Image: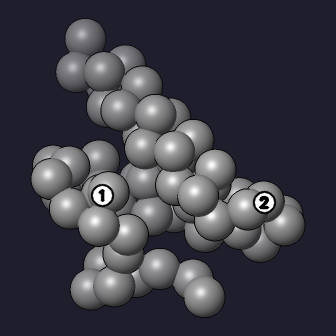
Amino acid sequence: MPWTTEHYPSAMQNLPRLVRLKAIAIANALLAEGMEEGRAIRIAIAKAKQWACRGSS
């Protein structure tokens, strides 16, 4: 099931709002490609954090 801004994995709960939104988008894309949910969550969080760091420098 795709995640939304109201329904997302608990692992994303403490992320800043913009990082969480990016992680949700990445995770949904990975799920659409057939990736396993747990792996998609971990990768999405890591990539969203990288995205946020690049944007702040």
Q: Residue at x 45, y 64 (%)?
A: 24
The percent position of residue 8, horizontal first and vertical second, equals 36, 75
Q: Residue at x 20, y 62 (%)?
A: 13
Query: Which residue lies under the disc numbered 2?
Result: 35
The percent position of residue 34, horizontal first and vertical second, equals 84, 67
Looking at the picture, does residue 12 appear above or below residue 31? above
Q: What number is the disc on residue 12?
A: 1
Question: From the image, which quarter does the N terminus lie in?
Answer: bottom right
Asked which colour scheme the image uses, the reply is one colour
Question: From the image, which quarter does the C terminus lie in?
Answer: top left
Q: Residue at x 57, y 41 (%)?
A: 43
The percent position of residue 46, horizontal first and vertical second, equals 46, 34
| Left or right of 11 on screen, residue 17 | left
Q: What number is the disc on residue 3?
A: none
Crowding at label 2, few (<14), some or many (≥20) Cα neighbours within 10 Å?
Answer: some
Q: Residue 31 occupies which quadrant of the picture?
A: bottom right
| Left or right of 25 on screen, residue 11 | left
